[in-house]
Image (tube, grey):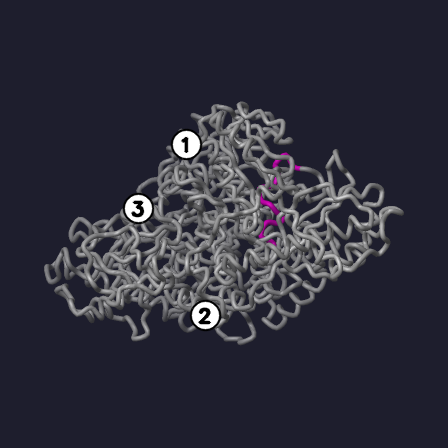
């Protein structure tokens, strides 16, 4: 397949692919290949090449795409959904929608593993953590999880880790949301835990290691569980509360009731329902358990000037170093959504949240009073926003009457105690007109009712909210000035701009992260996300209201099947790490269905993503490592030995292809054959699918299951570390074991749900679908080819300056390459961290550091980067090599040089005291750095200090305006938090008298 030579402005692929046809010719000369076809033939083993071209239908132009998306959206019918069950309509302030959700400075950013260039989103996440810790009354919160149900599952696993009880059972309040109960059961089963569902009144605290209570309950009921929590604590068990953060503005927080852990969803903090997601879940706990907290945690450290600086903290506790002992995945976050929720909190503040919550509670009370006047019984005495009415034989008629008025209510399906209940959940968008329509749908129950009854206006002045007096909140929350400083849109807009300016995202420069495929999410792909036809649907709405979604989901599944060679797809997993977990659950269920219950061994190469061992452990498997040879390939001799050793127990192998070392292993078919011959299944990690689309299909060369990172290969944005989608494809024999869901009809699967919603983060599926429609089969294939070209071009330009660690056949790499920096540490003291930080001075985000090999950089340019940008990056790397050479020759100091002191901030340029032997120009404006360069807001951040002084909420502020006049003034010692820290600017506190010692970086090992 030859590259096209004619530029067509209406073909989207020419807008997506970076190099022009002329550039391709020039790049091939550097690479040393006569044609792009020849390069692909050299890089990819012929034995796995796709036999036929990828056929997905004709590619659409952008106008054609938007027209089609509009038509599909019109076949969804957004109703006034009062179903509740953890999902509510909310108002997203336009200033947040325009400046965060629809702003590429936020949605194209990467996970903040490089803190110096991530201060904006780290501050936003610290706001989120502070808000959640304050609302829950607990001491520490993380930076978000995937959804409320998976947060509850993580909390259950955390409870097992920290509980003093030896029990293997976990209690769940029957008034928890059904999807939460189902996800808990899915998580518990492979680990040998029993989930006991029932009334907390009958809880035997001695028989469980923990318990989960919904607060308020799924039915709306609010109960004080403090006595039950005391009983749990008396037996060493852990108490968890799944709480509604909005309700906590009015209710006594879980921490004050004695809870050890609180979870919830911040969806109603301005985030659209989106047919299920994405939404940021939250989890908070006591400080004593902070090192067992799952996911990511933002903390406050100091930089080399002693100024406060944000960073991810305690991140070594999970898959970074624990690998097969890890109990959760760090790649399970919803950062963009957490930023939106935190900004909703910043915009409204504590007073605003109280007012919103009070209005919701008052509306619910008026709704209940009106129903009571019509003869209906409201059985719940105390509630916040939800009531449940036993409708008896009139249930169907009332549900239909509500539908005729454009309203969805909740049918309590499967409730044997009250099978005819109807649930009604009001929210901040519920108007008097909506309430009156509900009354009309119910009508008078009997002669004692008042027929049509009084109007909302007449009733609302007669009622007070139905919160229990003993559980009304008396404690303050969100008292930091950041939650009171941005009431006007002007100030809010400027705050969001200030934070965005502190970050380095894809809207400024390439992000050449190996294993993470940071390519542009085109504006046309993103636009439909905000349309009401996609954003305003409740995930449990009747199927006939989501026909557009059904069409899109079916076509997306068909396209993924065509791309991968698998036979069936599940779109439910809402992260790559969750996709891994789901695929392994399918393998486990397959073996068990065949009676092979002893098959629990999962072989994983030593080069694998850190998420792989963690996922295997979560799926109840035992990890056995397989060695790699000197070229980075799986050691076939060791693989055969391990497969034979564990033949009777072998469940699966997890292998990334192209390999984590950035090459197409020629022995991939042999690897699959060895595992199959010994009764195992092959899990092909799809993290590197960007090198294969249209060229090779995992399902054709031996894979049984793979996950597809839609946020990598198919352009869903990373959003600073989430959202993500990790659907799995399986061969036909595994199709019966794809995850089920309580809200989905059809034949149940032995594997329960892994996410709260049937289709996970459904609304952002629109982005991947749009990308595939715009590119077509030929365009997607060309994207893979250009990705391989760009990587080989970088390898060709850097060869001779840096050692390239691994090559595949014919001395080619796949879509990424690994540059070895270890020799420099021995000769000059320069570390891979120094080189990564120096790249910031040149205006670049660093490649992936020290993964899969410590002391290396893994570089992936993606197909959307132009030759000019690739050259700019290569020029920077070559210039840095020249700086290292100056250290080697003695022309530059070994201990005081631009690499050791990088990155340089504007304060370095302005400081009258320039203490270094090299010039300011060299330090701050290195060769190739342009005049409009990016200035990081802090100097190098001290990781060790941050882990020793764990501060994960906004620090207390004595006076928001009482900062030091001179930001360069010296102080005598390092304080963990400077008391004069301004809430919007880290650059105002004093530096220390001497910089802290440099600390070793943490490896990102990012697979999600």
Q: Is residue 758 magenta?
A: yes
Q: Nearer the viewer, residue 491 or 542?
A: 491
Query: In this view of the protein, can residue 64 be seen by the observer?
Result: yes
Select label 1 or label 2 by which is in front.
2
- Earlier sequence position, callout 1 versus callout 3: 1
Please identify the quarter of the rendering in which residue 864 is found.
Answer: bottom left
Mark 3 surroundings: few (<14), some (14-19) or many (≥20) residues within 10 A: some
Quarter of the image where one finds residue 884: bottom left
Q: Position of residue 100 (x, y in %)?
A: 49, 64
Q: Residue at x 61, y 73 (%)?
A: 63
Q: Are marks 1 and 2 in contact (CB under 8 Å)?
A: no
Tell me the CA gap for discs 1 and 3: 36 Å
The residue labelled by disc 2 is 491
Q: Residue furthest left?
A: 890
Residue appearing at x 48%, y 57% in the figure: 342
Residue matched to label 1: 624
Magenta range is 749-762
Q: What residue is disc 3 on?
A: 949
Q: Which quadrant of the view contains residue 899?
A: bottom left
Outermost residue on the front side: it is 462
N-terminal of the pair, mark 1 or mark 2, is 2
Q: CA distance from mark 3 to mark 2?
A: 32 Å
Discs 1/3, front: 3
Toward the viewer: 313 or 230?
Answer: 230
Query: Dot 1, how many residues are within 10 Å of its Cα: few (below 14), some (14-19), or many (20+)?
Result: some
Residue at (52%, 63%) from the top-left corner?
101
């Amino acid at each position: 397949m030859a590259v096209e030579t004619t530029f067509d402005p209406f073909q989207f692929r020419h807008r997506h692919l970076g190099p022009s046809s002329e550039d391709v010719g020039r790049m091939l000369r550097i690479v040393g290949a006569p044609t792009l076809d020849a390069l692909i033939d050299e890089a990819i083993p012929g034995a796995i090449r796709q036999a036929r071209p990828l056929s997905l239908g004709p590619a659409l132009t952008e106008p054609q795409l938007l027209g089609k998306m509009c038509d599909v959206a019109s076949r969804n019918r957004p109703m006034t959904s009062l179903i509740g069950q953890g999902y509510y309509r909310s108002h997203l302030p336009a200033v947040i929608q325009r400046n965060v959700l629809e702003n590429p400075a936020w949605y194209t950013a990467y996970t903040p593993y490089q803190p110096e260039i991530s201060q904006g989103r780290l501050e936003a996440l610290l706001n989120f953590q502070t808000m959640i810790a304050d609302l829950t009354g607990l001491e520490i919160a993380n930076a978000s999880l995937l959804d409320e149900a998976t947060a509850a599952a993580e909390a259950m696993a955390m409870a097992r880790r920290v509980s003093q009880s030896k029990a293997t059972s976990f209690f769940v309040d029957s008034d928890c949301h059904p999807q939460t109960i189902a996800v808990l059961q899915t998580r518990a089963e492979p680990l040998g835990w029993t989930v006991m569902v029932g009334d907390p009144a009958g809880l035997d605290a001695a028989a469980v290691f923990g318990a989960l209570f919904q607060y308020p309950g799924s039915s709306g009921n609010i109960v004080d569980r403090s006595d039950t929590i005391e009983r749990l604590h008396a037996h060493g068990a852990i108490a968890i509360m799944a709480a509604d953060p909005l309700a906590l503005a009015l209710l006594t927080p879980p921490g004050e009731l004695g809870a050890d852990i609180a979870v919830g969803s911040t969806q109603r903090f301005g985030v659209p329902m989106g047919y299920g997601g994405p939404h940021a879940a939250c989890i908070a706990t006591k400080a004593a358990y902070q090192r067992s907290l799952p996911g990511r945690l933002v903390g406050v450290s100091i930089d080399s000037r002693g100024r406060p600086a944000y960073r991810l903290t305690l991140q070594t506790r999970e898959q970074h170093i624990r690998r097969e002992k890890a109990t959760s995945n760090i790649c399970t976050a919803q950062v963009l959504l957490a930023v939106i929720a935190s900004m909703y909190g910043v915009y409204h503040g504590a007073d605003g949240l109280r007012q919103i919550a009070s209005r919701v509670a008052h509306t619910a009370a008026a709704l209940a009073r009106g129903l009571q006047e019509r003869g209906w019984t409201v059985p719940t005495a105390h509630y916040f926003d939800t009531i449940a009415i036993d409708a008896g034989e009139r249930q169907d008629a009332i549900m239909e009457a509500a539908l005729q008025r454009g309203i969805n209510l909740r049918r309590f399906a499967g409730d044997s105690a009250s099978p005819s209940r109807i649930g009604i959940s009001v929210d901040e968008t519920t108007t008097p007109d909506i309430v009156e329509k509900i009354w009309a749908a119910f009508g008078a129950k009997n002669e004692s009712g008042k027929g049509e009854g009084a109007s909302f206006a007449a009733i609302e002045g007669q009622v007070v909210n139905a919160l229990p007096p003993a559980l009304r909140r008396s404690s303050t929350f969100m008292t930091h000035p950041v939650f009171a400083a941005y009431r006007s849109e002007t100030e809010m807009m400027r705050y969001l701009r200030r934070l965005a300016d502190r970050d380095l995202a894809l809207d400024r420069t390439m992000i050449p992260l190996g294993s993470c495929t940071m390519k542009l999410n085109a504006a046309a792909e993103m636009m439909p996300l905000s349309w009401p036809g996609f954003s305003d649907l409740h995930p449990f709405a009747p199927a006939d209201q989501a026909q557009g979604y059904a069409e899109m989901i079916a076509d997306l599944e068909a396209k993924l099947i065509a791309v991968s060679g698998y036979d069936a797809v599940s779109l439910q997993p809402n992260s790559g790490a969750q996709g891994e977990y789901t695929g392994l659950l399918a393998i486990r269920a397959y073996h068990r269905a065949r009676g092979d219950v002893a098959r629990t061994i999962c072989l994983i190469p030593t080069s694998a993503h850190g998420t792989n061992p963690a996922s295997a452990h979560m799926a109840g498997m035992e990890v056995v490592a397989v060695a790699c040879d000197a070229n980075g390939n799986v050691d076939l001799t060791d693989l055969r030995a391990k497969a034979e050793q564990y033949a009777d127990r072998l469940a699966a192998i997890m292998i990334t292809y192209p390999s984590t070392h950035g090459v197409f292993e020629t022995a991939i078919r042999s690897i699959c054959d060895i595992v199959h011959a010994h009764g195992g299944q092959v899990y092909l990690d799809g993290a590197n699918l960007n090198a294969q689309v249209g060229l090779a299909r995992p399902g054709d060369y031996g894979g049984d299951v793979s996950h597809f990172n839609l946020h990598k290969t198919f352009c869903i944005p990373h959003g600073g570390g989430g959202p993500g989608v990790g659907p799995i494809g399986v061969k036909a024999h595994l199709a019966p074991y794809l995850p089920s869901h309580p809200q989905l009809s059809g034949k149940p699967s032995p594997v329960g749900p892994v996410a709260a919603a049937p289709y996970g983060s459904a609304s952002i599926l629109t982005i991947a679908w749009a990308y595939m429609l715009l590119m077509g089969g030929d365009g997607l294939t060309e994207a893979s080819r250009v990705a391989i070209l760009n990587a080989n071009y970088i390898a060709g330009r850097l060869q001779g300056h840096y050692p390239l660690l691994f090559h595949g056949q014919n001395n080619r790499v796949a879509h990424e390459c690994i540059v070895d920096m270890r020799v420099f540490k021995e000769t000059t003291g320069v570390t891979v961290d120094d080189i990564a930080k120096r790249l910031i001075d040149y205006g670049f985000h660093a490649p992936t550091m020290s993964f899969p090999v410590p002391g290396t950089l893994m570089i992936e340019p993606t197909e959307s980067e132009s030759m000019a940008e690739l050259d700019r990056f290569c020029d920077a790397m070559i210039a840095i090599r020249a700086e290292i050479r100056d250290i080697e020759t003695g022309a530059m100091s070994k201990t005081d040089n631009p690499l050791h002191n990088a990155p340089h901030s504007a304060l370095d340029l302005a400081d009258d005291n320039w203490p270094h032997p090299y010039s300011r120009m060299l330090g701050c404006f290195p060769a190739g750095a342009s005049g409009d360069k990016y200035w990081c807001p802090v100097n190098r951040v001290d990781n060790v200090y941050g882990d020793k002084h764990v501060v994960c909420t906004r620090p207390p502020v004595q006076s928001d305006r009482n900062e030091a006049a001179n930001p360069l003034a010296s102080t005598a010692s390092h304080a963990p938090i400077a008391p004069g820290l301004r809430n919007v600017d880290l650059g105002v506190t004093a530096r220390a008298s001497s910089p802290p010692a440099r600390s070793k970086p943490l490896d990102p090992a990012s697979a999600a």
